[in-house]
Image: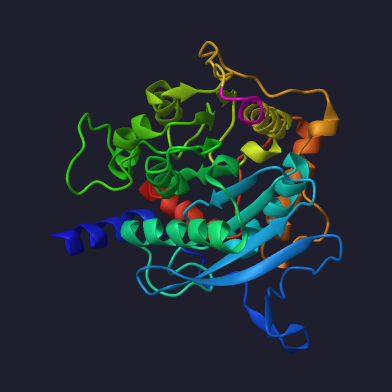
Amino acid sequence: MGGVTSSIAAKFAFFPPTPPSYTLIADDTRGGQLYIPEVPRRDNVNVDVLKLRNRKGNDIVAIHVKNHKASATLLYSHGNAADLGQMFELFVELSIRLRVNLMGYDYSGYGQSTGKPSECNTYADIAAAYTCLKEQYGVKDEQLILYGQSVGSGPTVDLASRISNLRGVVLHSPILSGLRVLYPVKRTYWFDIFKNIDKIGMVNCPVLVMHGTADEVVDWSHGKQLWELSKEKYEPLWLSGGGHSNLELYPEFIRHLKKFVQAIGKSKSSTNSSKKTAAESDTQSKPSETGTSDKFELGSDLPEVSRNSLDSRLEKSRKSNKPEKSRMSTDRVDRFRRRKGLVW
């Protein structure tokens, strides 16, 4: 029965970019160190490219971006139609803006990771990344922030529900569960996947939820209900007019993330007194039209696989002061999936 469930899950939830947006090459001049040739190698950015073996026997590709001013590490689980080549520049910018070390990884069957995508494999994948952070980089649980975007909220909430002393959790356009994206069911069925609705109450750290009010893929109600069910709520970010894949283009996105990272950092460093993350009222946060210093703009050295779509979105957002509906580099595939209600 578990195999049937996994098969159903894979058909609904996983759409790895085909072909992958990047390749891996071993640099013989640096002792076989791995690098991604599609991404410009910059002297001022310290990035490790890694292969991790998960408990299922799959080799998982991960990148670790180091910030020498960091006091926290962010473990990022991306959405279901992206891979590390497309996410690389965002990871670098988040590391710089938030002053954190950041690890991102590709799920089994994504990018250059081996194996096949499945719910069970994503749990093994994030566990391998978590183990690497602890054993290779010396990261303690109280220094770790888990970040899950869209379907990445599944492995994020699952891991967070089993670790008692995390610094924080960020849920970006999250899902209540896989089936609830497609149908407004009122109960959890055995064949459902990524049952965040049943696990979020076991997360014992501050939880920030960010969701666009005009999300056409995962309804805003998913984020609202997960926030309401969280034990330790942090002020949520409801971006008025925000879609499913364009929240990074709103100035309030990076501003609110920075506020969260700083707040939970102070909370951890100040003796375990009363928590400073009491929830504020469930009020919409409208995107700011001023304060351009917090506008989230990616650098000019984007890999070609995602450069055109991101650059055009950024240019249009400057002209209109409101982001357009996001387009990924796999536009035609995404349009088909959205018609079927499958991209999340």
Q: Furthest residue to the front? A: 271
Q: Position of residue 127 (x, y in %)?
A: 43, 57
Residue nearest the viewer, comparing 207 with 224: 207
Range shown magenta: 267-272
Q: Position of residue 168 (x, y in %)?
A: 54, 35
Residue at 21%, 57% in the rendered image = 5
Q: Position of residue 198 (x, y in %)?
A: 29, 35
The N terminus lies in which quarter of the figure?
bottom left
Residue nearest the viewer, comparing 197 with 199: 199
Residue 223 position (above or below residue 76)? above
Say whether residue 270 is magenta: yes
Residue at 37%, 45% in the rendered image = 158
Residue at 61%, 59% in the rendered image = 329
Q: Furthest residue to the bottom? A: 28
Say whether residue 189 is magenta: no
Q: In the image, is 52 to the left or to the right of 286?
A: left
